[in-house]
Amino acid sequence: MNIEIQDDLFIEDIEGVKEVYHSVGWMKHTNDVIKQVFDASNVKVIVKSNNRIVGIGRAISDGVFNAAIYDIVVHKEFQKAGIAKYILNHLLGELSNVSCVHLISTSGNEGFYRKLGFRKVKTGMARYLSSGLHDEYLE
Ligand SMILES: CC(C)(COP(=O)(O)OP(=O)(O)OC[C@H]1O[C@@H](n2cnc3c(N)ncnc32)[C@H](O)[C@@H]1OP(=O)(O)O)[C@@H](O)C(=O)NCCC(=O)NCCS
């Protein structure tokens, strides 16, 4: 597959990014939400194939101690072709000097991150506003 990457999100890309989120059922990602979360992320990757957005990833990093990876999402039609692995490796390359890179996998995708070297955090903690997410992700 012919692939190009962008390190930033442009206004004209927002509809394509929304299609990626919506293809996997993440329907809360409206144009405004997408702009907000990408504007707030200082490490971004947009993957295009033949000018169509097929995958995205983003991270927030302090550049030294900590970074968090969010939203590695590949369009449903383009999954199982190595695109998520490419996105994660690209983000990790950008974060190569950061001491700790953490993330929370969505349910069922832990094996993807495990394959690429991530391990469970002994003291990891989180709090969620949504009771559904609280029940799904917290002990
Ligand atoms: C999880 C997701 C990003 C994987 O994307 P993908 O492009 O199909 O993954 P890749 O093809 O790059 O897979 C890379 C490797 O991880 C493995 N892998 C992918 N998904 C996996 C899973 N759920 N469990 C275990 N292994 C998985 C693949 O088999 C492949 O292994 P290989 O290198 O030995 O062949 C994709 O299914 C997705 O977008 N899901 C919905 C959004 C989501 O939940 N994202 C995670 C947010 S934390």
Image (cartoon, rainbow, N blue to C red):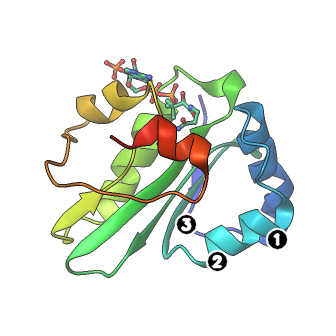
The answer to whether residue 3 of the structure is visible from this angle is no
Three-letter code, disc 2: Asp
Q: Nearer the viewer, residue 107 or 35?
A: 107
Three-letter code, disc 3: Asp
Please name the residue that numbered disc 3 is placed on. Answer: 7
Q: Quadrant of the N terminus?
A: top right
- Using the numbered discs, state the Cα–Cα distance from disc 1 to disc 3 in whole angstroms: 14 Å
Give me the disc on residue 11.
Answer: 1
Please rate how many residues cluster around mark 3, counting C-alpha atoms within 10 Å: few if below 14, some from 14 to 19, many from 20.
Answer: some
The answer to whether residue 69 is above or below residue 104 is: below
Are the residues flagged by discs 2 and 3 in contact, CB closer than 8 Å? no
Three-letter code, disc 1: Ile
Q: Secondary structure at mark 3?
A: loop
The answer to whether residue 135 is above or below residue 112 is: below
Left/right placement of residue 56 relative to residue 120 reads right
Q: Nearer the viewer, residue 97 or 123?
A: 123
| Residue 92 spot, x, y in % from top left | 31, 56
- Using the numbered discs, state the Cα–Cα distance from disc 2 to disc 3 in whole angstroms: 12 Å
Q: Secondary structure at mark 1?
A: helix
**Residue at image x 39%, y 57%?**
91
**Residue at image x 64%, y 69%?**
37
- Using the numbered discs, state the Cα–Cα distance from disc 2 to disc 1 in whole angstroms: 11 Å
Please name the residue that numbered disc 2 is placed on. Answer: 39
Mark earlier in primary sequence (2, 3): 3
Quarter holding residue 139: top left
Q: Nearer the viewer, residue 1 or 83?
A: 83
**Residue at image x 79%, y 50%?**
18
| Residue 88 spot, x, y in % from top left | 39, 46
